[in-house]
Structure formats: C-alpha cells, structure tokens
Image (cartoon, rainbow, N blue to C red):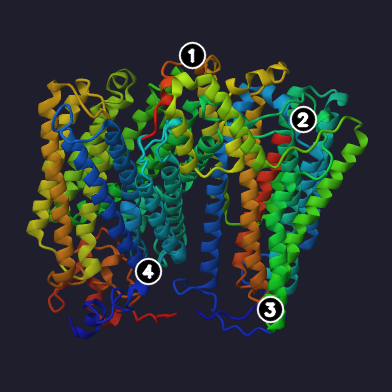
Amino acid sequence: MAVADHSHDHHDDHHDHGEFIAHHFDSPEQQFDSGKLGIWLFLVTEVLFFSGLFVAYTLYRNHHPEIFDQAHVYLNKYLGGLNTIVLLFSSLTMALGVRSAQLGKNKSCGIYVLITMVCASMFLGVKAVEYSHKWDMGILVRSAFDFTYTHPDQTIISGLSNYLVYLSVIPLLLLVGFIITSVVFRLIDKAVWSKFWMGMAITVGGYFLGVVIGYLFMAAKIGEAKHAYIEPVRPIALYAMTQDTDHAKEDHAKSDHVKGDGHDKDHDDEHDDEHHDAAHANGEHHDDHGHGEHHGEIPEFDRNVGTFFSIYYCMTGLHAIHIIAGIIALGWLYFRCLNNHWRSDYFGPVDYVGLYWHLVDLIWIYLFPLLYLID
Amino acid sequence: MADHHDDLPKFCHPVPTKLLFGVFFALIFLTILTVVVSALAGSMGIPSAFMFPIAMTLATAKAFLVCAFFMHMWWDKSFNVIAFLSSLLFVSLFICMTLMDTGHYQSTIESYDVNQMPGVAELESEPAE
Amino acid sequence: MVDSSARKALFDTPETHFLNCTKGWKSWAFTLDHKRIGIMYLIGVTIALLLAGTFALVLRTHLWAFDGALPMSDDMYNQMFTLHGAVMVFSFIIPSVPAALGNIVLPMMLGAKDVAFPRMNLASFYLWIIGTGMLLAAILSGYGLDTGWTFYTPYSIETQTGVIWATFGAFVLGFSSIFTGLNFLVTVNTMRSKGQGWFQLPLFIWSLYATAIIQVLATPVLGITLLMLIAEKTMHIGIFDPKYGGDPVLFQHFFWFYSHPAVYIMILPAMGVISELISVYSQKRIFGYSFIAFSSVAIALLGFLVWGHHMFTSGQSQVVTLIFSAITFTVAIPSAVKVFNWLATLYKGSILLNTPMCFALSFIFLFGIGGLTGLFLGALSTDIHLHDTYFVVAHFHFVMVGGTLTALLGGVFHWWPKVWGRMYNDFLGRVSCFMVFAGFNLTFFPQFVMGSRGMPRRYASYDPEFLAFHQLSTIGAFVLGWGIVLAVGVLIYAAIKGPRCGANPFKAASLEWQSSSPPDFHNFVHNPLLNDPYDFDAMVFDEELGTYISREFADPSKVPPRKEPVHH
C-alpha cells in the first residue's frame, strides 16, 4: 500500500502515505485508473443526455429551416462569441490547474481553479444579460412566445431590465453571504475557511463582471442603432398575473356556455398541482386562438419561431445548469487546494473535474455555431 | 510530447505549459474565424449551403484540440478514448433514425389542426378527478 | 489433509463477518459495503415487488367479472395498471438483478474488496428510494397517474394526474440505474484479481457488464426525455405537443430509444444468473462460454437498433418500420445461442434438482415461450393484428416475470446461503417454485389466447366471451402471488433460523464461494486463489469442514497469507 514519495510537494506535507487511498484499492494507480474510467463513462452519459436536445434541434432545423433563418437574428452573436472565449479561457486555466496539481503545486493550482470559477460565473453573467434582454422582448418558449417586432433593430431596449435585476438577486445574496462568512472565519482565526469563502465571493463577483461586460456590449449596440426604443416590460410575475386575469375573462366570455364550472376547477387544480414558474403561468394561457387577433397585425411573422427559442432555452439552460454544477465541483477542488491535498500520486479529483469542465466547454463549442451562427 | 519527469508516477502526465497556451490560441483563432466567416459569408460569395458544414468542421477542429490536449486524450488509455468516442456513435444512430422517420411523416404533422380534432373540446371541459 | 485449523480459519463461519462487524441502524444506513447495500436493495425491490404485485392482483380481481367485479371506476383501473407497470418496471425489475444480486456478488466474483465507487453505490440506493417515493407520491398527491408507464404524449401533457411527480421519479430512478451501471463497468475493468483475464470471468459478470453498457448509454436519454416532457407539460415548449406544432411521435422515439434497451437491462442479468445456475447444478463446464459471453454483448448492442418495433402502429413511416422489423429478428439469434448453450450444458450433466435449479429450468421454458412469441410481434403483418392486445401483455410478462423474476428468485436461492451462512428448506423452496411456475402459466397462457382473439389491453371491462379466460388468469395470478410470498417466507426463515451451512454447499467454483459464509467485511481473509469458474473437478469435499473447497486449499502450505485489512 505504501508508495515511495515521488511528490514534488513544496509545501509542508504532513500527510501519511495512502491517506487518500480508499481501502478497497491496492495502489494509487488502480485508484486513479478507476476514477478516470469512471469520469469518462460519466462524460458518455452526459453526451447522451444532451443528445436528446441535439436530436430535437436537428429535426426541427431539417424540417423547418425557415424558422431557424428567421429566429437566429435575435441572438446576439457577439455576446455568444464573448462567452465562447470566456469558456475557452477557463478551459485553459483548468488544464493549467491540472498540470499544477500533477506537479504538487497546490498554491498555483488553487489560483488556476479560482480563475476557472470566475470565468464560469462570468459566463453566467453574460448569459443573464442575454436571457433578460430576450424576456424583455417577449421572446419566450413556444407557447409563451409574445414577440411582435419583425426586425431585431426595432427591439432595442433602454434601461435596466427588470428580469436582470431579479436574476441577480440570488448572486447578490450569495456575494454578501460569502463575504460575511469569510470575515467571520477570519475573526475566529480559521484562515483556510476564510480564504475559501473569499474565493467563493470572488467567484460570484465574476457574475457581476459578466453582467457589466454584457451590458456594455449591448449599450454599444444601442449607440450605433438609432431606432425607437421600447420600454422594458413589466416584471415577470406581474406580467403573468395580468395575463392570467385578462385571459380568464376572455375565456369566460367566449366559452361560458360550453364549459361552465368545470373550467374554473380545471384552472385551480392546475395551479395547486404544478409548481408554476413565472414563464409557465405566462405560457399556459397563451394558446394560438386566444391571441389570434393580436398576431394578425403582423402576418409575415411565423409564430412557430417560438419552437426555435424553446430549443434554445432548453439547450442553453441545461448547459447553464451544468456550469453551475461545475462551479460547485470547482469550489470543492479549491477547498482541497487550500488544504494542500494534491500530490503527484494523488491528483485524481482535479483531473476528473477538469475533464467534466472541458466537456461543458465542448458542448458550448457546438452550441455556439448551431444556435448563434445560422445563415 | 509531454514533460518527462522520471520521478513522477507513470499515470501522472503533466502537459507542457507551452503546448497548453498554443492550443488555447489556436482555439481563439478558430472561434474568431468561425464568427468572421459567418458574418462575411454573403460578401465572400460562399453559398449558404456550405455554411453549415464549414461551421461544423471548425467546431469539430476545436473539439479535437480540446479533447486531445486539454482532456489528455492524446496520452490516455485507448480504452477510455474508445469508450468516449463510442458515445458519438450512439448519438448519430439516434439522430439518423429519428431524422429518417420524422422526415417521412412531416406532412401529417403540418396538416394537423388541433381545433379540428374530435373530442378536444370535451377533453378540456372534463372536470379533473 | 494435514491440519484443518488453517482451513477452518478461512472457511468456517467466522465470529465477526460483514453482518455483525458493526452494529446499529447507522452502520447500515451509511454503510459503504457492497454486500450490505445489496441486501438493502434486495429488501427494497422485494417491497416494490409485493406492492406492485398487489396492484396487479387488484386488477385481476376486478377482471373476474366482465363488467368489473370491484367497485372501481374505470379511471381508477387506469391508475392501478399504470402504477403496477411503472413501479414494476422502474423500481423493481430494472434494479432487481443488477443492483441487488449484482451488488452482493460482483465484487466477490472478481476477488475485490468492494466496487470501485462505494459512495456512489450507496447514493444509487438512496436515489432509488427517492425515485420510488416520488412514483408513489403520484398516488398520494390525490391525482394518481393514468398514462401507462410509457407517459405517451400528447395524453401525458393533457391529463391532470400526477405526471410530473411520476416522471421526475423515473428520472431519479434513471440516475440510480446509471450509478450502478457505471460502477460495475469500472469495477470489472480495473478491479479484477491479478491474472484474472476477461475469459476467466463468470458469465454473470459478462451479462452484468453488457447490462451496464446499456445503463450508461441508454438511461441518460430517458433522463432528457423526461425532462423535456416536464418542460412540455409546465411550459409547453412545443417539441412534443401537437397543439404547439410539436411532434408526439417523436416522444415515442425518445422514449423507446431508452426503453427498448431497458428491456435488455431487465433480461440480460437474468440470463447471466441462469448461466451460473445451470452450470453449477449440472456440475458441468458451461457449454460455449465465449458464445454466451459475446451473445450478451451482442444483445446489448442490437438492443439499440430495434426500438421502432414498439411504434409500428403509431404513425411511424413504412421505411423505418421495415428496417426495425428486420433488425428485430436478429435479436433472436444471440438469445437462441444462449438457450441452446444452456441446453447443451444440461446434456449429460449430473443434474441436482434443488430450488435454484428448478427456477433455472422454469426460466428456460418461460423465456423460450416469451422469446418466440416476440417473433410474432416483430413481424409486421401479425403485429398490426396483435398490437395492444393481451397477446402483447402475455409476451412481455413471459419475458419479464417468467424470465427476470424467476431468475431473480433462482439467484437469490443460490446465493442466499453465501450471504447469511444458513440453508433454506429446499422442499418448501421447490414448492414455491412450482407455485410460481404453475400460477404464472395459468395467468398468462390464457392471455395469449385472448389476445389473439382480439381482447385489447388496458380495458377495465370486456366482452363476456372472454370470461372463462379472464377467470383462469385471475386464479393463476393468486397462485403466483402466493408462490412468491411463500418463497419470500422460506428465505426470511432461512436467514434467521436456517441450519448453518458451510462456505460452499453447492460445489460451485467461482471466487465468491472461496470466502466464508457469511463473508468477511473485506470479502476474503486470504487472497482468493484464481481458478476456472467452471472447473468443478477442482473442488473437493472437506470432511472436517463439511463443505467443498478448492483442491489447492487442502494443503495448508498453499493457503495464501491473510491480507492485512485496512480499517477506517
């Protein structure tokens, strides 16, 4: 079980050999190989997990290319490109982090991992700007799709999006919470924990950096296009509520004699049963005929365009969830870096999380041209 | 290819920093190339039918760089590489079969009108259990 | 035989073994030991089996009369069969053999101390509990679930029942299954004993490996399918919902891309169990080892190419239908290879007709019928006639119950003495096997007849002409149910009060029998001696120990030294 110390650990290494070798493995190599095969197989499951969405994408693009042609112009390819570069850079720092861990350089590994995390949340910040902008325009999933402008230049919105504010509440709370936690740990003399939480606070700071950069990109675009601005729409919850009542009234007027009481009950039941998020509440009551007249004003615009955005939200949303999971895994690595856990015969977790992170990057490498660069 | 350290365990395989940076700049170059080609496609006279293959080829080139060097596939056990790449086989199977089938019945879906279907009104007005 | 004390130290039931090395509920709830997790899984799937079996008995009782014997609305009937199907498929059959039996046996067959990722193994079990709980929450939510276990769109989008709970439950169960599969793949790849080559593995390992390939490749697709269904139901994203320009048949493609391979997740491990049982209880080297091994892998891969045969009548295009039908027939080849090899193994073997072997023989019979009737359904012209009739119901029950459940019971009886160190009552075991076999045939044979005469599945009432068949079927279902209860009773009694048995009462040759019964926490107190898992002549009876041991162990000087256990 004991393995000769080959490690280049420059730090004070107080570990006994085999501290991180689980009891059922015979050697560090067996443990590393098992973990490595395990993570590759996990990546296989990830690829197949995403495959469903790629299938949906391929089918709809093949059968309805016109929808994709109309829709993609509403995606900002410069923000997409910016995010691509951010992710690629994070992949670089991740690879450098793995190298440091392999050489037992815990300190530089920690720095690289931290940069990777900051890039990850910066990506999310830019994504939040993109999402909120689209929600402002009423570009939502298929059933809730409520966009009435036929050209992207008509859609520039001034001011701070309400949605963006809502999206940023959680990161803001996290930021404050992490800073306070870090200070508290500093006060009770737990330096490692304090450092760790400060690192997490810096990570969340990356989100706001992303938001600012994303906004500057958008502002630059506003500057160059001299078109009428539209007001930011109402907050999403309020919007959903008003839609609800409007629609209910309309529905009653239309279908009182057919549906009667059962209809009301229907609605109530649904509300109890399912956990609506706002977009849902919004969407449920928008069926095709309900708003027929509204869309009648712009006949050339195909409402099926919403299908593209359904796929867009599913793909990028799932990808964003993976980014968040990645940040959590990276945070765990960061903590272990601070505790000087890595040695050249024990660096597996860094390698595994690294592979996962590169896969998230790989998926984005495909999503970017598929969604943003359709011509 | 990689740094050679005699004193490292044999499963430990650090990739040289220069190589990592080289790969990174190649990736950035390819990204910019993708955006530029996409933006200038019209003016360069590239038929739009070629755009999709071009974009996918560039993306695959990037994917290759990430897999081979960032993910250490170049030096990895061949079993791991085969296991990972085999997933693509199953994805393509999935895509091809569904594409072939849905292509055949698209017209049925396009002619579907929910309001014409018998029983829709009754279904919606049925009270929940 | 010189001195038996060295052998006794290895093979006699030890003072402390994995069952009693730590005590208290926490030592079970947070255990990382594969054997304990396997036992907990076994208890869990048994509860799921009994629960879903009770649903089935309610259904059968209702069908005693052609207009419904129980005061049950048709909607309740729909919910009942949906829950029967969903719980049986997702919570019972899929984890039954791999996660319960496989967990106990697989690492020992490799001579390893544990699976590669013990924590993930435990997580898999807890995900199973959560997922099953969510499936059942669909009932408790007061809405039930009435879509059938397949959740077909667009009905699953329209219905007011607890589809979201159930789909999320199935999603979580999918992850549980992936964890098990991933764990097994890695364990078999990296944790074999030194010198144990791929072709020295017992066939059960090969079948678990093939199963794990499917679990890893197919289950994620189920995950994304169910997530998309949930998104469709909550937000109407318009991918599956025809109201919003979606394609409901696409859902079936997605669903069966997982669920057809999942059918082989259900049957492949069962086939592995049977390969072991047939060989051990014939005391004969398994015939055509490599054919059986590769046919498992072939079935796993072919399983990905045939999903469209579930959709022959649901609007799938004719070209694709033809392709799928043709490939479907090819699955029969590796399946038949296995059956022929088992029969060839039995030929001139010294057959011991004890409980596990009885189950194994009934497996061959029932699986034979189940497989052959599958050919009728794979053929396009007959399938149009038989689609959605009781013929289909009978076919897949022959494979899933007659196949998997029988093999599970056989396997549990086979390895039960190893796990508890106690022997069961063989006579009662055989009685339970007979009841299961007879009851099963009585239940489902009439359904073939009904189905071919046009009795549609999933109906709460039927034409009086089918009355006699339905009543036979109902009687059979109760016999089957009591047979299973008897088997469970025999096993539980054996675990508590059964007579002590030696390390290897059945003269089996694979590695797990080289440990004491029950095994040590680390599975082996010595380094297991690698031998051919099907070389039964290498086993000799040790008078002093009262059990079979490997010939090499008869000489204590060859007994490998005790491993230094590393305790945490």
User: Pointer 1 indicates a residue of which chain?
Assistant: B
Q: Nearer the viewer, residue C177 or A258?
A: A258
Please determine if labels 2 and 3 lie on a single subunit: yes
In the picture of the structure, the residue carrying the numbered disc 2 is A73
Q: Nearer the viewer, residue C4 or C246?
A: C246
Please determine if labels 4 and 3 lie on a single subunit: no
In the picture of the structure, the residue carrying the numbered disc 1 is B116
Residue A52's place in the image compared with C552, above or below, is above
The image's mark for residue C29 is 4
Please determine if labels 2 and 4 lie on a single subunit: no
Q: Amino acid at mark 1?
A: Gln
Marks 2 and 3 sit apart, C-alpha to C-alpha, by 49 Å
User: Pointer 3 indicates a residue of which chain?
Assistant: A
Of pointers 2 and 3, the one earlier in the residue sequence: 2
Viewer-nearest of discs 4 and 3 = 3
User: Pointer 4 indicates a residue of which chain?
Assistant: C
Q: Residue at x 26, y 79 (%)?
A: C10
Apparent side of residue A189 relative to residue C388 in the rendered image (left or right): right
Cβ–Cβ under 8 Å for marks 4 and 3: no
Cβ–Cβ under 8 Å for marks 1 and 2: no
Q: Amino acid at mark 3?
A: Phe
Looking at the figure, which quarter contains the C terminus of chain A?
top right
Q: Residue at x 34, y 75 (%)?
A: C521
Q: Position of residue C275 (x, y in %)?
A: 26, 50
User: Pointer 2 indicates a residue of which chain?
Assistant: A
Dot 4: element: helix
Marks 4 and 1 sit apart, C-alpha to C-alpha, by 56 Å
Apparent side of residue C433 relative to residue A19 in the rendered image (left or right): left
Q: For residue C69, what is the image quadrant?
A: top left
Q: Amino acid at mark 4?
A: Ala
The image's mark for residue A185 is 3
